Image: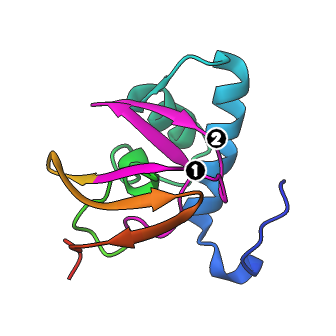
Amino acid sequence: MMDYKLPYYDWTMASVLMNEVGKKLQAEHGDHPLTKANIEAEIVSYGIYKPQSLFPSDYCYNLINRDQGSFRFHLFIWIKRGHYIHVGPYYPYTGPIKWKGNTIGEWKHGEYVLWEDPRN
């Protein structure tokens, strides 16, 4: 397990599992993107979550969804629909934040600003 900067009790079981799965699969795939299907299959193999109950897009630096749990734990960079690179938490990401194809915020060196929040 990695050293989480947030107190461990702030991390949900889903976010810890998503991070561990992402880290494991990215080590196996090198610099190549992970697919949503690969991530989901590995998560389901643990027997804790059902298919389509966790979404990598909720754990992205550069993508936000309407769900209240989205954009809380940042673990992946979204490449294109269904494709992600796992970089883990506290990555010094710089780039736009997208929602439904529109830029609604940005990251600069690991700090973000949302101009619009679809979760509200």
Residue 50 in sight? no
Coordinates of residue 7 in the picture (x, y in percent)? 75, 81
Residue at image position (48%, 53%) is 49
Q: Number of labelled discs?
A: 2
Residue 13 location, quadrant: bottom right
Whether residue 85 appears in magenta in the rendering, the answer is: yes
Q: Which residue is mark 1?
A: 18
Q: How would you rate the neighbour count of disc 2 (Cα within 10 Å): few for under 14, some for 14-19, many for 20 or more?
A: many
Coordinates of residue 70 in the picture (x, y in percent)? 37, 65
| Residue 117 vertical position relative to residue 64 in the rendered view, above or below | below
Coordinates of residue 84 in the picture (x, y in percent)? 45, 33
Residues at marks 1 and 2 touching, judged by CB atoms closer than 8 Å: yes
Image quadrant where one finds the C terminus: bottom left
Q: Look at the image and give the residue range highlighted in magenta.
A: 70-97
Tell me the distance, in whole angstroms, between the alpha carbons under discs 1 and 2.
5 Å
| Residue 68 vertical position relative to residue 88 in the rendered view, above or below | below
Whether residue 8 appears in magenta in the rendering, the answer is: no
User: Relative to residue 83, is residue 90 drawn left or right?
Assistant: right
Q: Which residue is mark 2?
A: 21
User: Relative to residue 64, is residue 109 drawn left or right?
Assistant: right
